[in-house]
Each structure stands twice: as C-alpha cells, then as structure tokens.
Image: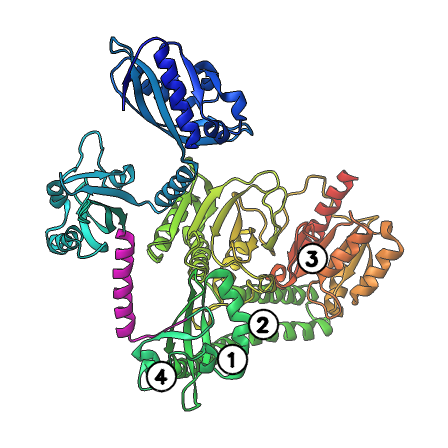
C-alpha cells in the first residue's frame, strides 16, 4: 500500500511503519528519499552483529561503508531508480560486513511506500532476508556442477523457451553471443534423427505429469559437425496452482568417451572370447573374473565358467606359484608388464609349459595371455639336438681337413730342421745348415699366422668416409625395426676419413644395433623406444667408461661411434660375459657371436669398445675407431724417438716365460746385445725381484699365458711397486686383451708376437729404452 502525504506527515508515517516493523520482529530499513535519513529495525541491526540502539538512525554514507564493493553499483542502481520514480519496486541481493568481519548475504525486497503531493517518491521501505545459507548452498552446487562438467538447462513450458549454462555451450562448441538454441524446435534440429523418438517420449512424460524425473541418452550434433553422446537428467522444477508442470530443469553430460570405451570394451571382450590364445583376467584379489574358451580348454575344463572365481595360484603347482609370488608379481607391479615362461597345471593334475604375457591395469586387475608351448618346446629341443649333431660333424670334418694340411706342412718343416740339425751336430756345412733351420722356422711362423687368419677372410682396407658405412648400416637396421622404434642418426656434416673396410664398419654398427633393437623389444612397451647412432670426435676424456675390449694408445687419434638404446640395460652380473664367445641372453634366437665379431674387428684395427649401461634404463656402446693405423695388436712398435744403437749395454732386463727353452732364447738374444738379464720361469719370482729392488731394473719382458699368473696381472702388480718401469708383452695369444679384461691405463708399453727374431727383439727393446731415457 502506498501513502501520499507531505511535510511532517511523511515522518509520522515512517515512525508508525517502523513501530509496526519492530513489533513484527522484521529486519527492515526505511529511507527518507528527500532527507537521506535511514532508520533500521532492531532485527536488521542484529543480522550484522550490531546493537539496535546504535543503529536506529544511520546516514546512507555510513551504511555504504559496510557494503561489499562488488554489490555497491547494483544496490545504488535499484535505489536511484526508486528515487527518480522510474520504479516503485526494489529487489536486490547484496552483502554487508558483519561486525566480526565476515560477509552476510541479504535479499532486500520492497519499494516506494509514500510520495509527496507532487508525486515525487518520498519514503523507501525495504525488508531484508538473510540468504547466506542459500548462497553457500548455491556455491556448493555450482562447484559440483562445474566439477562434473555438466551443462544446466531449463524449459518454460508455456513459452517453449530454453536456457542453457555456459558449460552447455562450451560442450557443444557454440558461442552464446552468436547462436542460441533457445526453443524446442532448435534443440530438435541438433538431435540425431534416430534418437528423436525416445527424447520426445521422455519430454512428454514430464510435461504430462506422468513422472517427476527421467534420464535419456541421445546424440547431439556438435558445432563442427560430429556427433557427441549426451546424457540428459532432469525433472519438474515448478508447477502451477493446479499442480501442472510449468518449468522443467536438469543437466546434460557429455558421455562420448564413456560410450567409446564401452564399445571398445565390447569389441575387446568379443575378440578375447573368440581368440585362439588363452586369455584370463583376475581381480585385484587374484580371482578370475573372465576366461575365454581357449583358456578353459588349455586347463582341461569344459566351459570358461568353471574357471571363474578360482584364484590364479590354483592353476599352477605350489612351487611355481611361490616363484610367481617372489619374483614375477613384484616385477609386474613395478613395470606393469611381464613376459616369460612357466609350468601350469591342468584340472587332472598334469602339467604343461606355457608362454605368458601379464599386464596389470591401474585398478590392479591382471590380464593374462598365454599359450601352450609343449609341442614347440619338443620341436625346439629336437632342432637343437640336430643342430648340435650337425655342428659336431662339421667341426670334426674341418678339424680333420685342417689337421691333414697342417701335418703335411709341419712334417716337411720338421724334416728340414731335423736333417739340418743332424748335419750341424756332425759339423757339416754349419753356416748353410743353420741358415736352413732359420728359414724353416720362418716358414713355421708364417704357417701359424695363416692358422690365425683361417677363421676369417682378409679384407682390403682403403681410405673411406666413415659416415657412408654408418648410414648404410642404419638403413639395414631400420628395415628390421618395429614401427614404434625410432632410429636417430647423428652424423657430422663434414667427411670423417679413415683407413678401413666399409664392410667391417657395417658389421660393427649392425651387430650393436641389432642388440639394441632386441633390448628395446624386451623392455616395457610404455617406455620411449629409441636407438641413437652417432659419430663424433671424442672429448678430452676420450669417453666416460674404460674400454672393455682393446686399448686406446695416447698417441693415436680416434673417432667415437656410439650406439645407444632405451632397452632393458645389462645387469652387473652379465657385463663381464657379453664379449665371451657363444654367450647370449637370447636363448635359441642368439648365436653369442655378434659382440665377439665386434671385438675381433676392432682389435684388428687397434680400436676399443666401452660400455655404459643402466639396468632398466638402457645401454650405450662406444667404439673408439683409429683414424690412422699404427702397429697391429701383435705387430711391430712405432718408430723410436731416440737414437737406436743395436746395443743394450748397461741395461738390466727382467725376462719372464714359463717355457724354459723360449726363455733361454730371449735371454741369450738380449745378452748378446750387451744387456744384463735375469730370467724367471715363475712370475712370482720376478715380482719378488722388483719388490726387493724397484729401481734396479730398466725393463721387463713377460709372456702372457703362464700357469701361476698372467702377464697382465704381473704387469699390474709390478707397477704398484715401480709405476714407471716399462713392461713389454711377448705372446702368441691374439686375444689376450679380451681374456684379461685389461682396463686403461694399458699395463704394457708395447706388445710383440711370438716367435720373435733377435733383430726385432733388440730393435724394440732399444726403442723403449731410448724413450724411457728421454723421459728420465
């Protein structure tokens, strides 16, 4: 009801009104729009924590100080509209600061209650309701809706008007400023034609009052043209006085991903059910919740249902189940996948070999795919026996052929030596017969050299650009890789010339690359699958790991060929075995000769191989390849840097060899050149001599293969007492480095082959002693 009065009448009316409001215990305030004087009811003051006596009269500016800054414009706009006579209604939600500092949400509803005689609004009356709880509930509800990514909608049935939330527009890809599907006809145009009938049926049940709530799945056309699956849930929000629905409201969820997952799951279950491989799934407690027909047949059951509910351990002998618990399951939980072989048990108690692939999903379920490999095992064993028999027969034939040829050649040499020695004993033509014996010894040396090379073929070496064979090897390797394995080539832009045979380089890189491929295939599929082949000049440290094969003389320039992978890596217990002949981790798929071939090729070039491996992360092989050829592993030393006189006068040399005849010849060669020689058949005696007088010796000559101690072990032990004492290896063992596992620094200043002539021994000794004299 509005009043029209003037002067003090308005004030009196306001007083009466305030008394009525106070008696009714209503929270309200009045404002004289002409004087600006505000009056608040006691209950209004209490809502914001104030004493009513202090809030009976309040200027508008004082009330504005308690108003939330974000609400000031909205409140003042409603107030000004009433003051200007543009509206008689006031309805605003706003916040006032409570006395203790928190914000109180209020809804002010009222209007102009009195006018001046000229019709000017005079008295504004507003009733305030505390809506803080409602606002908190709305905020929680909005957070829930936002978290669920649900689009909110409402339908006014009388007008057919539809309103949607911002998330609905975002879900559909529409800009609400450009396009608004605000009618039922526009929504129908977005629904898939096949889904319209059941969407309309659900809407009709709500509209007619048959139900208060329903949900329906259907497809909506996205703005870019594709279909999304939607789930709409809603019900009656408001009714008229007759109880008929007037407003419907609800939410719409995008369930496209769930639909796609359901289709994939259905297809997967169908594929697994029809698979020839046995497939089973266990829950996090280890009990089977799925098994296909192949799984049932493999374990001796008529139907898959017979397996459901069994614990996986019921399908294995007790000792096999314990092995799974101790080794397989921890690996599966760590990596998410495990592949291997096991022994399973059928329903009748018989056992069989099976090949397993286990995968653990994020919920803890285990998917098992397995095959009965009993027949394959039998066939592999038979093939292995046949291969072994064939290899034995081939080796026997090769040995027989080689023995016949060697026996013929050596018999001729022995006949010449024996005859000449007989004539020497009788004093007949001494010089001529001695020369004949020396010639026979040279022929014997050549024959031994031929035997060393008999296992392979000589390959010509020439000047090549190392980038070309590396690139060719990568092409060959790439053809054997799975599509998900990336091969990275890191080759320099400028040529890298070297004296080599391209086939040797290809063999080295290809063998290392194939090992890298196999290591990646054995690693979990979720890991980055990558092989990197690079060619570069080494840094000052010449690599981070010492060579496992070969050595790196400090006076030779090298390049580094690296082959790195992200595979399984090599466990510490296997690292020292990988270069051993016939050693393999690939069972029947490997020959154990790949890395042996790599090491033999590099030893022939005077190169080296280093390994950096991290179990579970990958490996990196670094090949140190010489750019210029120096002395061969068992060849002659490089040119001397000091004068060589052919005499060793004044030098004390320690000679060690377990063969007394060979030791006697070496000692006599050195003594004829003027050296003072101490000869030892036991390396421990030589070590004791150095320990007693480390500075008394100028050089040590040692054999490699001795029963008590190898030459490499002797050299290392000697250098602990005399670090600068030069040690020379004289050996007929071509692969002494592999057998010793020698690490840098190399224990020998040079390596000489057996048999050695007097001239070569004196010349090499003179060079070494000359260099040692310069360093001193």
Quickly name the residue at label 2. 413
Residue 512 visible in the displayed image? yes
* First in residue order: circle 4 vs circle 1: 4
The residue nearer to you, when weighing 433 against 407, is: 407
**Residue beneath the point at 38% across and 73% down:** 289
Q: Are marks 1 and 2 in contact (CB under 8 Å)?
A: no
Q: Is residue 247 covered in magenta? A: no
Going from N to C along the chain, the mark reached first, 1 or 3, is 1
Whole-angstrom CA distance, mark 3 to mark 4, is 72 Å
280 inside magenta stretch = yes
Q: Which residue is mark 3?
A: 729
Q: Position of residue 159 (x, y in %)?
A: 13, 38
Kindly report which numbered mark, 1 or 3, lies closer to the viewer in this rendering: 1
Q: CA distance from mark 1 to mark 3?
A: 53 Å
Real-space Cα separation, disc 3 to disc 2, in angstroms: 28 Å
Please name the predominant secondary structure of the magenta segment in the image: helix
- When the figure is inspected, residue 541 is found, relative to residue 119, above or below; the finding is below
Neighbour tally class for label 4: few under 14, some 14-19, many 20 plus, Cα within 10 Å: few
Callout 2 secondary element: helix
Contact (Cβ within 8 Å) of mark 3 with mark 4: no
Residue at 31 percent of width and 79 percent of height: 294
The mark closer to the camera, 1 or 2, is 1
User: Mark 4 — residue?
Assistant: 306
Residue 256 in the image: state x and y as whole percent. Answer: 26, 52
Going 58% across and 72% down the picture, which residue do you hit? 413
Give the residue number, with chain letter if any, for mark 1. 320
Using the image, determine if residue 213 lies above or below residue 124.
Answer: below
Rendered image quadrant of residue 707: bottom right
């Amino acid at each position: 009801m509005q009043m029209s009065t003037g002067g003090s009448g308005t004030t009196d009316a306001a007083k009466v009104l305030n008394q009525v409001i106070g008696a009714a215990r209503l929270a309200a305030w009045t404002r004289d729009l002409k004087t600006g004087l505000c009056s608040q009811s006691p209950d209004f003051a209490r809502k914001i924590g104030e004493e009513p006596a202090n809030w009976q009269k309040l200027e508008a500016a004082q009330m504005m100080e308690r108003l939330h800054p974000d609400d000031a414009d909205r409140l003042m706009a409603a107030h000004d509209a009433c003051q200007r006579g543009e509206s008689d209604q006031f309805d605003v939600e706003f916040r006032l600061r409570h006395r203790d500092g928190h914000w109180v949400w209020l809804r002010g509803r009222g209007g102009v209650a009195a006018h001046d005689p000229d019709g000017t609004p005079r008295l504004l009356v507003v009733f305030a309701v505390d809506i803080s709880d409602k606002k908190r509930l709305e905020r929680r509800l909005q957070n829930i809706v936002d978290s669920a990514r649900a689009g909110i909608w409402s339908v006014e049935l009388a007008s057919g008007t539809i309103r949607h939330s911002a998330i609905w527009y975002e879900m559909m890809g529409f800009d609400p400023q450009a396009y608004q599907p605000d009618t039922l006809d526009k929504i129908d145009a977005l629904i898939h034609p096949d889904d319209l009938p059941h969407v309309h049926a659900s809407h009709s049940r709500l509209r007619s009052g048959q139900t208060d709530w329903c949900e329906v799945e259907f497809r909506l056309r996205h703005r870019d043209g594709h279909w999304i699956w939607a789930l709409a849930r809603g019900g009656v929000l408001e009714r008229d006085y007759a109880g008929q629905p007037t407003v419907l409201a609800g939410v719409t969820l995008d369930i496209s991903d769930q639909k796609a997952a359901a289709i994939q799951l259905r297809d997967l279950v169908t594929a697994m059910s029809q698979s020839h491989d046995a497939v089973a799934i266990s829950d996090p407690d280890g009990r089977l919740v799925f098994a296909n027909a192949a799984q049932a047949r493999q374990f001796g059951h008529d139907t898959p249902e017979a397996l459901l509910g069994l614990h996986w351990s019921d399908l294995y002998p007790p000792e096999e189940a314990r092995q799974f618990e101790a080794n397989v399951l921890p690996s599966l939980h760590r990596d998410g996948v495990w592949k291997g072989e096991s022994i399973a048990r059928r329903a009748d108690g018989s056992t069989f070999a099976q090949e397993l692939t286990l995968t653990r999903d994020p919920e803890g379920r285990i998917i098992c795919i397995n095959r009965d490999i009993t027949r394959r095992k039998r066939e592999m064993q038979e093939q292995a026996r046949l291969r072994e028999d064939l290899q034995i027969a081939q080796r026997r034939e090769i040995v027989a052929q080689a023995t016949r040829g060697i026996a013929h050649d050596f018999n001729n040499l022995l006949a010449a030596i024996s005859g000449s020695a007989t004539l020497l004993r009788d004093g007949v033509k001494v010089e001529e017969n001695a020369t004949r014996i020396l010639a026979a010894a040279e022929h014997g040396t050549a024959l031994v050299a031929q035997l060393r090379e008999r296992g392979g073929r000589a390959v010509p070496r020439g000047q090549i650009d190392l980038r070309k064979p590396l690139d060719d090897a990568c092409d060959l390797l790439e053809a054997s890789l799975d599509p998900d394995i990336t091969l990275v080539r890191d080759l320099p832009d400028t040529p890298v010339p070297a004296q080599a045979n391209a086939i040797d380089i290809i063999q080295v890189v290809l063998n290392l690359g194939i090992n890298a491929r196999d290591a990646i295939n054995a690693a979990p599929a979720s890991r980055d699958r990558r092989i990197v082949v690079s060619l570069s000049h080494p840094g000052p440290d010449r690599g981070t790991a010492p060579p496992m094969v070969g050595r790196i003389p400090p006076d030779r320039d090298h390049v580094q060929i690296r082959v790195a992978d992200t595979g399984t890596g090599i466990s510490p217990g296997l690292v020292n075995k990988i270069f051993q002949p016939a050693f393999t981790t690939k069972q029947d798929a490997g020959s154990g000769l790949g890395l042996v071939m790599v090491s033999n090729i590099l030893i022939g070039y005077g190169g080296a191989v280093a390994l950096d491996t991290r179990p579970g992360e990958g490996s990196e092989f670094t090949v140190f390849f010489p750019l210029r050829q120096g002395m061969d592993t068992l060849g002659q030393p490089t040119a001397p840097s000091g004068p060589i006189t052919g005499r060793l006068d004044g030098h004390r040399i320690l000679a060690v060899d377990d063969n007394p005849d060979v030791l006697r010849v070496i000692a006599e060669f050195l003594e004829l050149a003027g050296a003072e020689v101490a000869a030892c058949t036991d390396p421990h005696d030589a070590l004791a001599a150095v320990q007693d007088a480390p500075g008394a010796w100028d050089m040590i000559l040692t054999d490699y293969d001795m029963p008590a101690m190898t030459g490499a072990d002797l050299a290392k032990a000697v250098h602990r007492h005399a670090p600068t004492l030069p040690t020379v290896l004289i050996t007929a063992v071509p692969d002494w480095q592999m057998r010793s596992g020698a690490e840098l620094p190399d224990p020998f200043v040079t390596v000489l082959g057996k048999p050695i002539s007097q001239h070569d021994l004196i010349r090499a000794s003179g060079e070494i002693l000359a260099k040692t004299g310069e360093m001193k």
